[in-house]
Image (cartoon, rainbow, N blue to C red):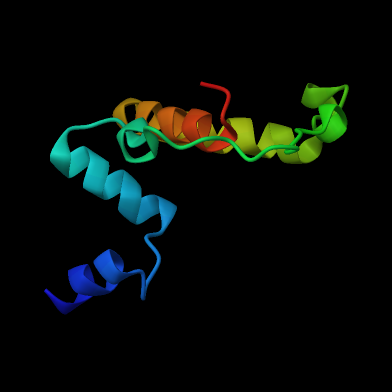
Amino acid sequence: FQQIQKYETGANRVSASRLWDIASTLDVSINFFFDGLQAEKGVKIQSDAMPSDLMGDKEALDLVRSYYAIPENQRRRLFDLARVLSDVA
């Protein structure tokens, strides 16, 4: 009970993984918690954030290999979370 109260009052922040768990428990999309929020003005995504040769990037290849090593149902949840966090969805 005290932990929930800390989240409610803003004394503690809710981590992305905890927010994901809460959304799953409530059977709602992560977007539910952000409905009505406006994006900050002047925030831009760098177009050069992604390497031009993605499959030539060792980190990207390691990430793809690790991703496909995850069981399919968990992989789908991870994919959905990544889309929400990257604001591509």
Q: Give the residue displayed 23% in from the left and 48% down from the top.
A: 22
On screen, residue 25 versus residue 14, left or right, reads left
Residue 9: % across, % down: 29, 70
Q: Give the residue displayed 25% in from the left and 65% down from the top.
A: 8
9 w.r.t. 41: above or below: below
Residue 31: % across, % down: 37, 32
On screen, residue 17 versus residue 42, left or right, reads left
- The answer to which quarter of the image holds residue 46 is top right
Say if residue 71 shows up in the picture: no
Q: Quadrant of the N terminus?
A: bottom left
Residue at the far left: name it: 1
2 w.r.t. 17: above or below: below
- The answer to which quarter of the image holds residue 44 is top right
- The answer to which quarter of the image holds residue 64 is top right
Foreground residue, 77 or 70?
A: 77
Q: Give the residue displayed 36% in from the left and 69% down from the top.
A: 10
Q: Give the residue displayed 51% in from the left and 34% down from the top.
A: 82
Foreground residue, 37 or 73?
A: 37
